[in-house]
Structure formats: structure tokens, C-alpha cells
Image: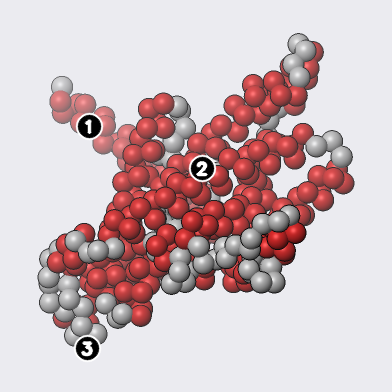
Amino acid sequence: MKGSTLAGTLPETKRESKRKWSRIARNWQLYLLILPVVAYYILFHYVPMYGIQIAFKDFIATKGITGSPWVGTEHFERFFHSYFFWRLIKNTLGLGLYSLAVGFPIPIILALLMNEAKSAKFKKFVQTVTYAPHFLSTVVVVGMMMIFLSPRYGMVNHLITMFGGHPINFMAEPGWFKSLYVFSDVWQTMGWSSIIYLAALAGIDNQLHEAARVDGAGRLRRIWHINLPGIRPTIIILLILNIGSIMGIGFEKVLLMQNNLNMETSDIISTYVYRAGIQGAEYSFSAAIGLFNSVINFILLISVNWVTKRMSDTSLW
């Protein structure tokens, strides 16, 4: 009995394998198109992971990665016990949560509003105005902030003094750093980020809106019961990706806005890695901090994906 089952299974397995290779051969053009993308990720994202091992070594440039001596978790322990540890965690997490709370819903609201605009000219004007900042470099944006917020010549402080207030040195006061970072980022990215939600809204069947109008549903009810459920999978996927990188704030903009006066709130993990690794030449120590940050992001991504998978049908995998 077992022999006959095995004999029947093997030819079926071979036929399935032949069908699989036949499908690949028929669609070879598609596989050829995706090959450069796969090669890019292997060469520039997976092969460099070889260097992660210096986080567990005392890296010496003359001996190379493989020749440097192992030190175990010494660099991680040094970071956990350092004076800056809790300040870095607090600032990084605070900035990430602030950016998520403010920056995530605004593109959704903008997309819903633009989708409801009836005038095509007005819609194009709003899209142009909101998309344009995306093409400015971070250096230009921070430069504009410094000019507008200057305590002596800035337009904002001129308005404050005009109404009887006192000039504020926004870029030097620690309390203003997070708000300046988050709201300037929202201004720069909200138009571009809303494109994906507009694309999702365009995919909603217009017959649903017609049926809702016949039933007497107003604009807000249609947004709430048709548009938002229609783009819910897109919102969930982007939320998972955003939470998964909540500790991965880039150092470029923070470093440009940072100075000795606002260091208390502007010092985050990525800027500390830059100082330790590039300025201080402590490559192993900075690699350990970067690895720790990546592990936290990975745990957050897995956890949020698991929760959304349990609560809805949408998840990354």
C-alpha cells in the first residue's frame, strides 16, 4: 500500500516540478526584469551585513574585519551603562512617536480632502503646492527654517514682536526642537505621501457612492463608511512600516538643526552613532549602537505586524 502510494506520488511531484519550470520559462522576461532589483539588494543590502561582526570585535583597521580580536558584548554593555543611554532612547523614541502621531494622519486627511474637491484646477493647484516641498533638499529646508526663525531678522519673530511679544530663539531652545523637526517634515512630505492614498481612493467603486447618495448619505458619511474602509489596507500597511522604523530617524536633518544649546532634546541614536563612528573613530562601538537600534526596529515591526494580523486581514506577510 505504502509502495503504491509512493509510486503514485513521485511521478506527480516530477510533473509538478516540470510545470513549475515550464511557467518560469514562459515568463522569463519578467524574471529577467526583476533580476537587477534582486542583484541590487544582494550586493548593497545583504553583502554589507558581513561587517556587522565588528560590533562584537575591537576593530583595528590594519588587521581588517576578520583579523580584529573578538570582545563579545563589551561595546553593547558600554552603551547600556553610558551616561547618554537614557537620553538617547528618550529623544529617539519621543521624536519617532511625535512624527508618527502628527505626520501619519495628515497625508490621509489631505488625500480625502483632495478627493472630494470638485474643481480640477483647484485640485491641481493644491497638489502642486503640497508636492513642491518634497523636491527641496534637507539642507535647503533647514536653511529656510534658520532664516524664517532668526531672532533678529526672521519673519516669524517680526510677527511676534509686531503683536507685542518677545523674540524667540527657536533653533537654540531645546523645547522647540521636536516641534520644528516634526512640522517642517510634515510640510515637506505630506503632499508626496498623500499620492498613495489618492491612488487607493481612485480604486474605490463609484457605484458605492451612487448607492449611498440614493440612500441619503452626505459627504462625511460617505467618507466615513466608504472611503476610509476602502483605503484601510493601505493605511494599515503604511502604519506597520512607519512603526517599524520609529527608532530609525535619519541623522541628516537632526544634525543640521543640532547645536550645543538644543543638544538636550536633539541628541538621538543616529547622531550619536555619527559622532562616535565618524568623528570619534570608534567603529566597533558605533556599529554596536546601530545594531541595537536595528534590532529594536525589527522587534517593533514583527510585533505590530503580528498584532494587525490578529486584528484584521491585512499584514505585511
In the displayed structure, 3 sits above or below 72; it is above
Please name the residue shown 57% across and 63% down the image.
170
Query: What x and y, as percent, mark residue 265?
Result: 42, 59
In the displayed structure, 3 sits above or below 36; it is above
Q: Nearer the viewer, residue 144 or 69?
A: 144
Name the residue carrying label 3: 62
In the displayed structure, 102 sits above or below 66; it is above
Q: Nearer the viewer, residue 112 or 317?
A: 112
**Please, what is the three-letter code of the amino acid marked with disc 3?**
Thr
Please name the residue shown 65% across and 38% down the image.
109
**Please, what is the three-letter code of the amino acid marked with disc 2?**
Ala
C-alpha gap between disc 1 and disc 2: 60 Å
Looking at the image, which residue sits at the far top?
215
Q: Earlier in the sequence, mark 3 or mark 1?
A: 1
Q: Secondary structure at mark 1?
A: helix
Q: Which mark is residue 101?
A: 2
Q: Secondary structure at mark 3?
A: loop
Q: Which mark is residue 7?
A: 1
Q: Nearer the viewer, residue 197 or 140?
A: 140
